[in-house]
Amino acid sequence: MDPRHGQPLPLIALAYSSFASGLILGYAGYAAAATIGAFVLVAIASVFRRLERAALGLVFIGGAMLALTSTAPKRHSFKARQSDSTSGPLDRARDRASRSIDDLFGSDAPMARALLIADQHGIPPEMRDRYARAGMVHMLSISGLHVAIVASAVMLLLEAARVRRSHASIIGVSITGFYVVVIGAPAPAVRSAVMLAMVAASRGVQRPTSPWAGLAVGALVPLVVPATVLDLGYQLSVAGIAGLIASGMLARRTLATRLEGFRLKIGKELLTSIVATLVTAPLIAWYFGRISVIAPIANLFAGPVIAVLQPTLFAALALAPVPIAGRFFADAAHPMLVAFDFIATAAAGVPGGSVSVIPSIVTVVAGAGVVTGLVAACMSRYPVRPVVAAAACLCVMAWAPAVPLPYRGGVEMHVLDVGQGDAILFRTDRGNWVVFDAGRIWRTGDAGRSTIIPYIRSRGGRVEAFVLSHAHADHVGGAESVIRSLRPRVFWDSAFPQGSGVYEQTLLAARETGVTWRRVHAGDETQIDGMGIAFLAPDSAWTAVLDDPNEASTVALVTYGSSRFLMVGDAERDEEAWLNEHSKTELRADVLKVGHHGSSTSSTDPFLAAVNPALAVISVGADNTYGHPSMDVLAALSRLGTRTARTDIAGTIVVHSDGRKLTMEAGGERWDISR
């Protein structure tokens, strides 16, 4: 290769890129088109004797085909059940570590679980949003950075004990590997451990290895479970290390000859933070709907804190069998956890520190092209070509919003993970949307801005209707943002006046934006594309004597072909009894959105018997203070033979209907729930 353009990428790195790209496109549903295009390129490369490129094309095809075939074992029948007995040793190790963390850290446990074992179930949406705005979300869960810090701390201790360097490397890698196994081997940690082992082996045999080769091998190992390629932590880990390697090359070429001493150190850290932020920006934009401008500065301050915090957390977990020692380190970690969160809070609060974006699949792919051009430019001594390619991708990003995206058809119910609240979206057979409720509101944002709006705009289609079940803040919290940004054609409302001040702002937003407001009456019906909505409650005579907004919830039956979805808001036992009395024959449904987040005040036996759902979905926050969902409700659903899916466990839940057959996707798995 021409030395003017820098060192070539190792073949293993190119092979990994091809394989991972094939997997991602395969899981995204584009395997057929991608495979046909790849076969054409393989044929052309073979004709011109570019055998390396032909081989890479075949690797790409292999990834796409593997994605198709690997989804098959994850399809289950309706009666399938997963039990703890089927969990593997890594899952059990992770569960034991989680219990130890809960015992040691108390109120700090959710953050400690995220940083030690990549368990973010206890992290509320507003915290994730805060770290996304600060550009520190990659630090909120264990990654290669955290494992590398632990490994470095172990090496320092061994060297301080005057252990020979060769022996210290073996011991350090062994301890790091044991730690990764104990925490359940999350993909980012496995990637980091493999890279550390490669570096140690390279030094041991005195054979220098390209950092790109180390990254490729480390990133390939977790793909023994192919669906790992879709994990956000894994994606951020690989992208972040790619940015780290690229920034190191750029620093050696640009800063090393101009700066020295402390200035060089600061310059390298700032350059690394800037490049890492840019490289991970498409992922952050896709998952969180924003790009942080303040991220390089925030990471500069957070880096030293996490460098001390992570070994302290590791020591607490390692010494958990000795409670006094474990709690000593857990208590020592508390002020650092506070400082870490303070940096995120301060950075998130900087005016203009983050920019809200509405990504689509096209803009994210184009953004990945920009990132690839950026990394290539960092590696190259003459970066004109990669810069031109990146500029072309930027042009695609600018024009992409004007191009409508295709939709596979059918009706989909999307139960979004918005914590302790409700936000359920129905996608019609023409790719448009009906939004039921809009989640929570907090001091610096709401579920509409942070979750619903990016979710809809990244998939395309317009919002035809917004339906509000009732005016409590965990349902109406993001409604004003949804109405002002997405401009639904009609706003259906139970019109019960009691609830929250946010409700008044929502009504004002509807008036100011010209959105048609309609009061729900029992018996009202509407048709949106090929999907029917029949409102079963509330009845105005019934609500006249009520003082609880929950009992005045909008209840709607959504139908498509023979598929039936029952939406009940926070309806409790009195409204359920009213429905049983007045609309019993209409209550039968395949899918039930369980009332009031699974509270014991809802889901009475007579009501559940009338509905008799195949699937019950519960929108609920992890570790909520209300004790939702009630064990009595879960037991009642189990007695009916109803499968239960919860957002606090599975995250966002998607149910697809073709008018006859129903399938559910949650937690990276798919079930057939047709009766």
Image: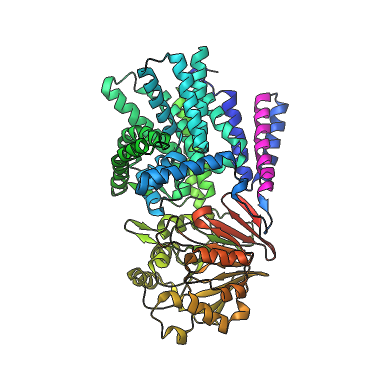
Q: Where residue 171 sits in the image (x, y, percent)?
A: 47, 21
Who is closer to the viewer here, 356 or 244? Answer: 244
Question: x, y percentage for residue 84?
Answer: 59, 49
Q: Which residues are magenta?
A: 50-74
442 shown above or below 585: above
Residue 333 is drawn in which quadrant?
A: top left
Lateral position of residue 400 relative to residue 76, left or right: left
Principal secondary structure, stretch drawn in magenta: helix
531 left or right of 551?
A: right
- Residue drawn at x 31%, y 42% is 334
Q: Considering depth in this image, is 57 or 306 the residue closer to the camera?
A: 306
Rendered location of residue 443, percent (x, y): 31, 58
Q: Position of residue 644 (x, y in %)?
A: 58, 60
At a point 66% along the width and 32% down the height, the residue shown is: 59
Q: Residue furthest left?
A: 262
Along the horizontal axis of the image, is 673 left or right of 202? right
Compare residues 628 and 92 and report the one nearer the observer: 92
- Looking at the picture, does residue 15 appear above or below residue 573? above
How many dots with numbers? 0
Colouring used for the render:
rainbow
Residue 590 visible in image? yes
Residue 50 visible within the image: no
The quarter in which the C terminus is drawn is bottom right
Residue 421 magenta-highlighted: no
Specify the quadrant that holds the N terminus: top right
375 versus 583 height, above or below: above
Would you place residue 465 above or below residue 58 in this image? below
Residue 18 falls in which quadrant of the image? top right
